[in-house]
């Protein structure tokens, strides 16, 4: 929810006035710096860019998309995309590619390319948000998975794995400590010949993505 100050700016017809653009841009920068999230204000900013094209700037567009990226599996990234004219897409290609990699479950590629994407450095807590998302997808994909494979998907070091297992409510197999039980439902385990999320079809991933978005 927006702060009282931002709510006052957006109240009634205020959300259509170009003079509040600097305030919303600053609010968006604060979200990146502090790890907060105000999707209503961010979408209002993008709408103002459409209504008043002279106020548009790549940094503001990119910042809104970064917050959308951190919100997966929520649909905020897509909602932002609908508000961004095609003429800006080339300049925003790096963040578009990262989003596509998450949607296609190409997590290893995502982590590799994210490491060299300078804009993410201003987004506090982005790694934790993405790990949360990937972990939710893993829980819906597999019953169990080898620890080394899990580390690759989550981009974690071995010393951080047990903390993540505890956070997710997962457990290590009593028979094999290198096997992590990520879902107690009765379906196929990934402990044998895991091929990796990058081999999923788009339709398969859409099902998993929906499942992750509706998980408690």
Image (cartoon, rainbow, N blue to C red):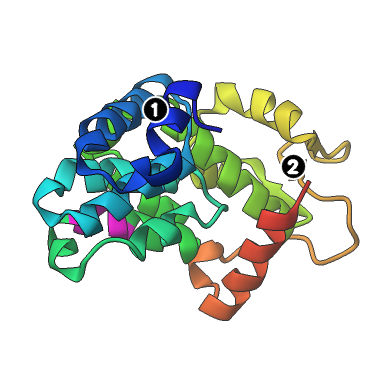
Kindly identify which residue carries mark 2: 180
Quarter occupied by the N terminus = top right
Classified by dominant secondary structure, the portion drawn in magenta counts as helix
137 above or below 205? above
Q: Splitting the image into 4 quarters, where does residue 119 fall?
A: top left
21 above or below 16? above
Name the one closer to the observer, 44 or 18: 18
Residue lying at 45% horizontally and 38% vertically, measured from the top left: 11
Residue 207, x across and y down, in percent:
66, 71
Q: Is residue 140 left or right of residue 134?
A: right
Q: Which mark is residue 176?
A: none
Under tag 2, what secondary structure?
Answer: strand
Q: Is residue 93 left or right of residue 152?
A: left
Name the one closer to the observer, 147 or 69: 69
Name the one closer to the observer, 112 or 204: 204
Start-end of magenta stretch: 92-97
Residue 8, x across and y down, in percent:
44, 29
Residues at marks 2 and 1, CA–CA distance in whole angstroms = 35 Å
């Amino acid at each position: 929810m927006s702060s009282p100050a931002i709510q006052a700016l957006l109240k009634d017809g205020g959300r259509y006035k170009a003079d509040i653009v600097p305030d919303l841009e600053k609010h968006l920068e604060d979200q990146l710096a502090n790890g907060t999230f105000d999707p209503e204000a961010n979408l209002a900013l993008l709408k103002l860019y459409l209504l008043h094209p002279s106020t548009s700037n790549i940094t503001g567009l990119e910042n809104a998309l970064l917050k959308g990226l951190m919100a997966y599996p929520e649909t905020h990234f897509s909602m932002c995309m609908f508000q961004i004219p095609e003429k800006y897409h080339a300049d925003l290609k790096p963040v578009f590619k990262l989003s596509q990699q998450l949607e296609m479950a190409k997590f290893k590629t995502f982590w590799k390319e994210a490491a060299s994407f300078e804009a993410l450095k201003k987004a506090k807590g982005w790694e934790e948000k993405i790990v949360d998302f990937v972990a939710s997808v893993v829980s819906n994909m597999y019953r169990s998975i080898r620890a080394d494979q899990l580390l690759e998907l989550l981009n974690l070091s071995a010393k951080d794995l047990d903390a993540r297992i505890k956070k997710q409510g997962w457990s290590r197999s009593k028979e094999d400590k290198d096997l992590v039980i990520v879902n107690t439902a009765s379906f196929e385990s990934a402990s044998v010949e895991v091929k990796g999320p990058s081999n999923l079809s788009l339709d398969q991933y859409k099902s998993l993505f929906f499942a992750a978005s509706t998980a408690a």
